[in-house]
Image (spheres, rainbow, N blue to C red):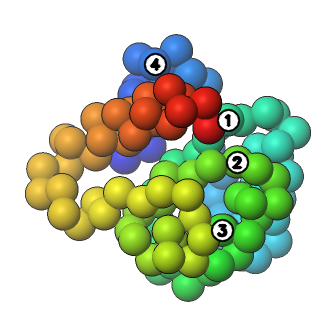
């Protein structure tokens, strides 16, 4: 999926930066790097580990003031800004378009 997201970012004229987050330290480092690189928003593609650390994602996103698009509503419930429930999108070709549309809305809101 990262290739599709990368293409969607490019179509919006936005940079694409990827981070692997398999540990708590990885999450903390990723957010510090997002802030250092002045990334305006992020897309969390989700994994069982990331789902188990959704509060940490929300806390770091708030700490660094970086809004995120998350894989399910549980992230928004934990304090994340927005969520797209990918499970409700049956056609996986729609995932990058949904992420791009949400990013455009966030940019219009000046988030």
Q: Are marks 1 and 2 in contact (CB under 8 Å)?
A: yes
Name the secondary structure under disc 1: loop
Q: Which residue is mark 4?
A: 12
Q: Are marks 2 and 4 in contact (CB under 8 Å)?
A: no
- On the rendered image, what quadrant is the C terminus found in? top right
- Compare marks 4 and 3 and give the one earlier in the sequence: 4
Q: Position of residue 67 (x, y in %)?
A: 62, 49
Q: Is residue 86 above or below residue 110?
A: below
Q: Report how far apart the C-alphas of labels 3 and 2 lie in the structure.
A: 10 Å
Q: Which mark is residue 66?
A: 2
Query: Is 84 left, or right, of 49 in this rendering?
Result: left
Image quadrant where residue 35 sits? top right
Query: Which residue in the rendered view is the most extreme toward the left?
Result: 90
Nearer the viewer's eye, disc 4 or disc 3? Answer: 3
Task: Give whichever of 55, 20 is nearer the camera.
Answer: 55
Q: Report how far apart the C-alphas of labels 3 and 1 lie in the structure.
A: 15 Å
Q: Which residue is mark 3?
A: 58
Name the secondary structure under disc 2: loop
- Compare marks 3 and 1 and give the one earlier in the sequence: 1
Image quadrant where residue 29 sits? bottom right
Q: Position of residue 106 (x, y in %)?
A: 50, 36
Q: Residues within 10 Å of mark 3 (few under 14, many from 20)?
A: many
Q: Which mark is residue 106?
A: none
Q: Which mark is residue 40?
A: 1
Q: Are marks 1 and 4 in contact (CB under 8 Å)?
A: no
């Amino acid at each position: 999926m990262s290739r599709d997201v990368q293409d969607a970012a490019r179509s919006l004229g936005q940079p694409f930066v990827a981070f692997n987050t398999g540990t708590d330290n990885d999450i903390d480092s990723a957010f510090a790097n997002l802030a250092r690189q002045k990334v305006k928003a992020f897309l969390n593609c989700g994994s069982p580990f990331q789902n188990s650390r959704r509060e940490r994602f929300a806390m770091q996103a708030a700490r660094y003031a970086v809004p995120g698009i998350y894989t399910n509503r549980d992230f928004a419930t934990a304090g994340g800004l927005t969520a797209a429930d990918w499970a409700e999108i049956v056609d996986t070709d729609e995932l990058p378009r949904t992420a791009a549309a949400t990013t455009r809305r966030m940019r219009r809101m000046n988030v």
